[in-house]
Image (cartoon, rainbow, N blue to C red):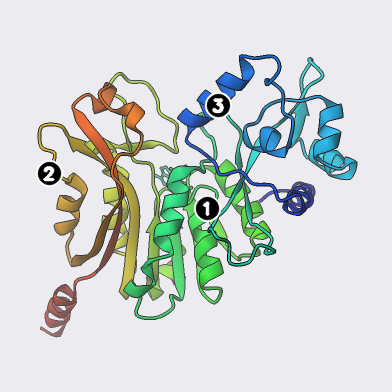
Amino acid sequence: MAEIGETTAYQALTKHLAKAKYAFVCPSPETQGRVVQKRSSDASTADAKNAPDFFGWNLPCTRETLQSIIPDAVFDSLRKASIITTSDSDKYRSTIRVSNFYLPNLPSQDPDAAPLYYIHSSFPPSSDSVFFGPDTYLFISFLQTIARHLPQAPSCVIDVCCGSGAGAIHMARTYPQAKALGLDLNPRALRLGGVNAQLANAKVDFFESNLFAAVPDDVKSLGVDLIISNPPYVASSTDGEDLPIYADGGAEFGLGISIRIVEEGMKVLSSSGAIVVYTGVAIPAADPGHDAFLEKLKKVEDAEVAEYTILHPDMWPEEIGKGAYADVCRIQVVGAVLRRNPKGEARGAEHRRQ
Ligand SMILES: C[S@@+](CC[C@H](N)C(=O)[O-])C[C@H]1O[C@@H](n2cnc3c(N)ncnc32)[C@H](O)[C@@H]1O
């Protein structure tokens, strides 16, 4: 759990940023790296000049510039909570980024509505960085379309590999009556999850958990109506180089964790529940019509694929042709929805009657 002083500091910051109509849509690490490198290579652009430079691109600046970006009281609370730090050079830096939670909906239906912000790790990322980025935006956009697969409002939602909880928070805002759980291995992510849930006025219980290991017994016995996930899906490196925990999807070209989520999720899913997985699938250059994830999903026992949508045909193009992706022609990002197979249910009931 984040400390009270830390949460108060984030609340003061985001309130100020909302008033100033702050906007920052978090790009990919590749894009952020290029922008920051270009800015840093020229002394006239290397320092932050405004709030998106400081809290989005994470450029440094002097105390004097910072005074024009945030009020003194906000500065003091951020300093006290070590959210803003300083180095020997007299320059200040933000240890976090602030991004728009939702992609701007243009033309905005209510231009006066306060934007919702999301706190996540600063740039550049480290091995235990708290992820938020283009994948999260696509994942949330996909979640906004899945209601038709739910026979009624869910009573219990689990976001597994939740990071700092974007999916769980979105579902808790959509279904405020539901019990919402966020599960992740990374305690730093869960700590910021608590902050982000408070900023969004959403009730989410976060648990440190290897996939479903920490799901409480009472939740398991009632069954979960909705399991959602945007897990790591990058193929483990072929040269032994460690990937960050938020990226490494393990075996099967990075599909290992996604497949386990479906197989293990089926064991805790309620009879009318749904599993929604957003993931990336490496498409082999030698067989461009083959989607390994879809093939796996079709074989999951007692499940049927209710939807399988390609959400991005060519994600992370900079990875193609090297390392584990040497023989891959593109990575397609998909949104999959699985339901219990009614025939499987009937078969199960038949077995139970015998
Ligand atoms: C790509 S990030 C996505 C985070 C979040 N779902 C989002 O949409 O922003 C993947 C997350 O999975 C977590 N993770 C990786 N392996 C895990 C495991 N075995 N069990 C639980 N969480 C895991 C990482 O810590 C990371 O936060």
What distance separates the C-alpha of mark 1 from that of mark 3?
Answer: 20 Å
Look at label 3 and name its amino acid.
Val
Q: Residue at x 87, y 28 (%)?
A: 64
Look at label 2 and name its amino acid.
Gly
Residue closest to the eye, 67 or 348: 67
Residue 195 in the image: x percent, y percent?
66, 52
Residue 36 in the image: x percent, y percent?
58, 24
294 sits left or right of 75 in the view: left
Q: Quadrant of the C terminus?
A: bottom left
User: Which label sits on residue 35?
Assistant: 3
What distance separates the C-alpha of mark 2 from that of mark 3?
Answer: 35 Å
Using the image, determine if residue 338 lies above or below residue 13: below
Q: Residue at x 56, y 27 (%)?
A: 124
Residue closest to the eye, 167 or 111: 111
Residue 50 in the image: x percent, y percent?
74, 35
Look at label 1 and name its amino acid.
Leu
User: Which label sits on residue 103?
Assistant: 1
Q: Which residue is mark 2?
A: 289
Q: Residue lying at the far bottom in this picture: please name it.
A: 353
Residue 134 in the image: x percent, y percent?
46, 44
Q: Secondary structure at mark 2?
A: loop
Mark nearer the N terminus (2 vs 1): 1
Q: Secondary structure at mark 3?
A: helix
Q: Residue lying at the far front in this picture: please name it.
A: 107
